[in-house]
Amino acid sequence: MNHSKPEKYIWKKSYSLVLIVNAFYILLFYILTVIFT
Amino acid sequence: MEVLDWVVLLATLSFIVIFGAIKTRKQDKVQDFLKGGNQGKWWTVGLSVMATQASAITFLSTPGQAFSDGMGFVQFYFGLPIAMVIICLVFIPIYHRLKVYTAYEFLESRFDLKTRTLTAILFLIQRGLAAGITIFAPSIILSVVLGWNLITLNFIIGILVIIYTVSGGTKAVNITHKQQMAVIFIGMLTAFFIIVSYLPEGVTFGKALKIAGASGKMEVLDFSFDFDNRYTVWSGLIGGTFLALSYFGTDQSQVQRYLSGKSVRQSQMGMIFNGLLKVPMQFFILLTGVMVFVFYQFNATPLNFNPLVEEAGVQQEQYQDLQRDLEINQKKKAEVSLAFATTDNPAEKAAYKEEIKFYTQKDREIRAAGTELVSEMDENIETNDKDYVFIYFILNNLPRGLIGLLLAVILSAAMSSTASELNALASTTVVDLYKRNQKKERDEAHYMKASRWFTLMWGAMAILVACTANLFDNLIQLVNIIGSIFYGNVLGIFLLAFFVKYVKSRSVFTAALITQVLVIIGWWFDWMPYLWLNIFGCALVMGIAIILQTLNKNNQQQVA
């Protein structure tokens, strides 16, 4: 394997899904914090 | 513990061990033993990664953490999904393309043998000690609350794990992880619903959350930039990504789990599965702790959940006075909490909320006074009782049979993490040190035998560390310190390998040695809290390697 060549990274839709869901969790926790405190 | 609990506990654990050992015993290829024959489907990889991270302490400590400090700990996991994406994007395709058995093998292909050997040894030191603590930590708690012998418990957990990891290697670890996770999910879900059903009439789940909120337990997010506050959104997103990247990307106990995937896609999907489920899973475990807190708003608790502290304390008259104060305070708190939950009048609600705050604060003060009293009597006694809250609740409140199931959850979690650790320690020893340094090529049978012997050796070592851990006051902290001393450096080496193609082997190896010395000096002279050594080590090795490479290049150009 030639390590001096730059790697090609392939972005998949599932990665975006993970990041969006993570942001959604944070939003949900924000709502919970506001409602219950 | 009743007979039914023993039956449930023994049947669950023996089934897992016997099934794991029998199902995978016929293996004669190293690839099968160390990489599970690359047969893992995404759900196997995903559950195995999850089971490796979830140790017994996760299920003992996390509910106690929520009971004491609320839901804020979940922020620590916000960086994990980001790290999962980076691992899927960068780490997994390269590891699979190179068909490596260990993460450190990749470093030889990218740099040289020296760098590979150095990182493998750093891993063996750190993980070898951690494997002992993975056994010791639940053993010490269970031995205190159940009165079981500590050494016997260490041996039971260790030997059960050794049986199937020596017999079936990675395949056995993966198979048993699925069953262990099933036991964990069933046990925790059942416990959660039972706790909610134990709440007084009129206190629904929603009202229970409001009571928890009034006591300050529902402050999930903290957006402050306070460095003294360990869990904030920012420390979770930045520090959490960093820590998860080092753990999942460079620690062989995790790398081995996704290397057993059938294809790049299956490994990636397993990690995506974790990226999606880990945060809600931790949230749920914390929520269980919050429900235990609400339950104890209406029920009596000891002054300290650690039975050893209670035993030491009750001999003092002052401690007995505090117990009485706590009892009176708890009765008032229960009355006010019930009134808060059942009224619909906003003005009354606000007034009761203030009262709940007052009694919660008073509760905290009485407990702190009790702790201080016992600490004055015996400096060595562990007065922090967070780890004992959930097990106290289980043993004193759950119905027959379910206590056995919850103990099976805790022991399954201890076994699942230990199994991955032994499996990874053996793989690294065989692949990176033993096989790599053999002068003549040996046959498959030889390396299979060596893998089994090294698994057994590391298992025995873990039991030995667990049995001697009690001799050291702060061994768990010591292991975390050792981890922080090495982790940053190793992650820095991997980041250079993946992202900074410009840097070559000589610069990295020299930088790694200098960094390791500087990190040890930094720790010795207490330059910073030890958790920051992770980031310090990583930044330092990357910075020094880039500078050395630039200097080398300039020198070479001048000579030319």
Image (tube, coloured by chain):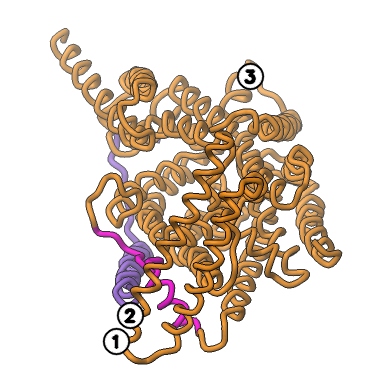
Chain colours: A purple, B orange
What residue is pinned by disc 1?
A: B347
Amino acid found under the numbered disc labelled 3: Gln
Magenta span contains residue B221: yes
What residue is pinned by disc 3?
A: B438
Q: Which residues are magenta?
A: B204-223
Marks 1 and 2 in Cβ contact (< 8 Å): yes
Amino acid found under the numbered disc labelled 1: Ala
Identify the residue at horizontal 74%, vertical 33% (top origin): B456
What residue is pinned by disc 2?
A: B351
Farthest top residue in view:
B559
* Position in image of residue A10 (x %, y %): 33, 55
Marks 2 and 3 in Cβ contact (< 8 Å): no
Q: Mark 2, chain letter?
A: B
Identify the residue at horizontal 43%, vertical 65% (top origin): B360
Above or below residue B437? Residue B429 is below
Q: Residues within 10 Å of mark 3 (few under 14, many from 20)?
A: few
Quarter location, residue B193: bottom right
Marks 3 and 1 in Cβ contact (< 8 Å): no
Q: Which badge, 2 or 3, is on the more N-terminal residue?
A: 2
Magenta span contains residue B43: no
Which of labels 2 and 3 is toward the front? 2
Q: Nearer the viewer, residue B50 or B555?
A: B50
Residue B203 visible within the image: yes
Asked which secondary structure carries label 3, the reply is loop
The label on residue A33 is none
